[in-house]
Image (tube, helix red, strand yellow):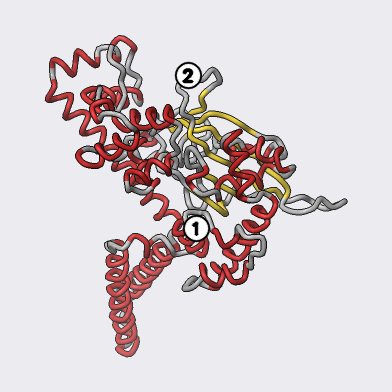
């Protein structure tokens, strides 16, 4: 049976075999590291001049990267089948199906790709609907206005006679509320149809801080110097953000500076070259805590890491206070993540380093190793409760032959297809639970 590998996966294999970092290959091919990351995870198609450029940078023939591309159809079909309860016998006949019915096989594969695209859109929309303060306020205003109109109309509909003066008042109230409802509806429609996604993603102060770090790539050279002024950096990066967002940004940048001072960039480069993206090894190298090592790894430039890493931080209420998502491992903005993530479980067992391999239930093609730990946010004092903060570092797991258990997790219950999960909080809108029976 031919090896079932997509072009992006072959590029990644060749790059790792050649010992070339992702950022270096991206520079040679004249593309961004984030775009190359999407290609290597088969999230972007590749061909033509870009394929030739990447092949030249790797020192191989373009055909060696596209060899087996005809099996992309089989890969997509197997990925679609892996999310079902199909038996091994049927699963093994995928090549026979594709050979006998190529048209239907291509249609099914295209449907699978559309499902993945729509799922990504649903993930973004459900996060927005859940945590968008402007949207919530607009809906509340509309419901309040409709209730007021209905109350006034019900009074006018009563059979008893109403004095003309009161009739005029109720009619005026209905007219004014209707005008306000129309204005709110138009404003909400314009907001939802806005094409500028950046404007819709910076509603809360935390969203503004996320936007600042996304723009900088989570690495801030100005804070890597021996003498770094957090106030000046905050003023530059926080230009145009709200007062609350500036306060959050200043606190995050101050922590960044402290981590950089304890773990200088030059020494970090040598440590990462030896131990990779292992926060426990990095913490031991510098004699610091594991959470600080996780934050430091997430702030390193792309050319120092073999693969990009993700980071999520939450407080004791499980609200996300910092997030660095990955293309194949998105993170909800303000919480409501999967209860199976070690990010939350570590709060029940603080000071213990959790290490496990995760695979998202809706993204079976990507595996990640998660490191998580919950640590006190301040000094321990006698007679006082301790507040804990949990960190979870997400590192791509390239090996497919893993002896340890693989934990199937989701993104959030609302879009998770795993109907048998014991940690489910609400039915999935994907229609895979038994909620429709009730």
Number of residues whose C-alpha sits closer than 10 Å to that of mark 1, classed few (under 14), some (14–19) or many (20 or more): some
Residue that numbered label 1 is attached to: 213
Residue that numbered label 2 is attached to: 401
Q: Which mark is residue 406?
A: none
- Which is nearer the eye, 70 or 26? 26
- Which is nearer the eye, 359 or 253? 253
- Which is nearer the eye, 404 or 298? 298
Q: Quadrant of residue 20?
A: top left
Identify whether 132 is placed above or below 157.
above
- Which is nearer the eye, 14 or 156? 14
Give me the residue at 33% from left, 28% from top.
Answer: 10
Identify whether 71 is placed above or below 211.
above
Give me the residue at 47% from left, 73% from top.
Answer: 240
In the rendering, at what x and y percent does residue 190 appear?
28, 67
Task: Judge from the rendering whether residue 341 lies leftward or rightward of residue 148; answer left or right.
Answer: right
SS assignment at label 1: helix
Q: CA distance from mark 1 to mark 2?
A: 35 Å
Identify whether 372 is placed above or below 84.
below
Quadrant into which the C terminus falls? top left
Task: Judge from the rendering whether residue 202 lies leftward or rightward of residue 53; answer left or right.
Answer: right
- Can see residue 437? yes
Give me the residue at 21% from left, 24% from top.
Answer: 70
In the rendering, at what x and y percent does residue 402 appear?
51, 20
SS assignment at label 2: loop
Asked if marks 1 and 2 touch (Cβ < 8 Å), the reply is no
- Can see residue 434? no
């Amino acid at each position: 049976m031919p090896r079932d590998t997509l072009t992006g996966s072959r590029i990644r294999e060749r790059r790792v075999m050649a010992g070339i970092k992702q950022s270096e290959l991206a520079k040679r091919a004249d593309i961004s590291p984030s775009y190359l990351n999407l290609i290597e995870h088969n999230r972007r198609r590749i061909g033509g001049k870009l394929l030739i450029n990447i092949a030249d940078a790797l020192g191989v023939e373009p055909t060696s990267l596209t060899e087996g591309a005809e099996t992309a159809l089989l890969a997509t079909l197997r990925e679609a089948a892996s999310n079902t309860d199909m038996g091994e016998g049927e699963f093994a006949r995928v090549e026979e199906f594709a050979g006998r019915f190529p048209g239907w096989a291509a249609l099914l594969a295209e449907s699978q790709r559309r499902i993945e695209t729509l799922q990504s859109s649903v993930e973004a929309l459900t996060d927005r609907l859940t945590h968008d303060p402007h949207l919530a306020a607009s809906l509340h205003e509309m419901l309040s206005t409709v209730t007021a109109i209905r109350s006034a109309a019900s009074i006018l509909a009563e059979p008893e006679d109403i004095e003309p003066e009161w009739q005029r008042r109720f009619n005026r109230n209905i007219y004014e509320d209707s005008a306000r409802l129309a204005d709110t509806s138009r404003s909400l429609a314009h907001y939802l149809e806005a094409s500028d996604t950046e404007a819709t993603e910076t509603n809360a102060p935390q969203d503004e801080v996320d936007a600042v770090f996304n723009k900088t790539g989570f690495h801030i050279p100005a804070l890597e110097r021996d003498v770094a002024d957090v106030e000046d950096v905050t003023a530059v990066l926080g230009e145009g953000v709200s007062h609350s967002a500036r306060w959050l940004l200043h606190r995050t940048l101050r922590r960044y500076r402290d981590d950089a001072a304890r773990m200088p960039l030059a020494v970090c480069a040598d440590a990462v070259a030896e131990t990779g993206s292992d926060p426990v090894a990095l913490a031991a190298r510098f004699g610091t805590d594991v959470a600080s090592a996780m934050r430091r790894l997430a702030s390193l430039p792309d050319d120092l890491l073999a693969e990009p890493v993700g980071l999520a931080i939450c407080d004791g209420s499980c609200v996300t206070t910092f997030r660095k998502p990955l293309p194949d491992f998105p993170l909800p903005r303000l919480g409501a993540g999967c209860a199976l993530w070690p990010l939350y479980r570590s709060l029940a067992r603080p000071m213990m380093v959790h290490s496990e391999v995760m695979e998202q239930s809706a993204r079976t093609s990507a595996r990640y190793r998660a490191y998580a730990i919950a640590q006190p946010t301040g000094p321990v004092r006698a007679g006082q409760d301790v507040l804990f903060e949990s960190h979870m570092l997400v590192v791509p797991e390239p090996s497919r032959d893993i002896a340890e258990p693989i934990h199937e997790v989701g993104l959030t219950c609302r879009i998770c297809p795993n109907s048998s999960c014991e940690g489910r909080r609400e039915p999935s809108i994907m229609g895979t639970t038994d909620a429709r029976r009730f």
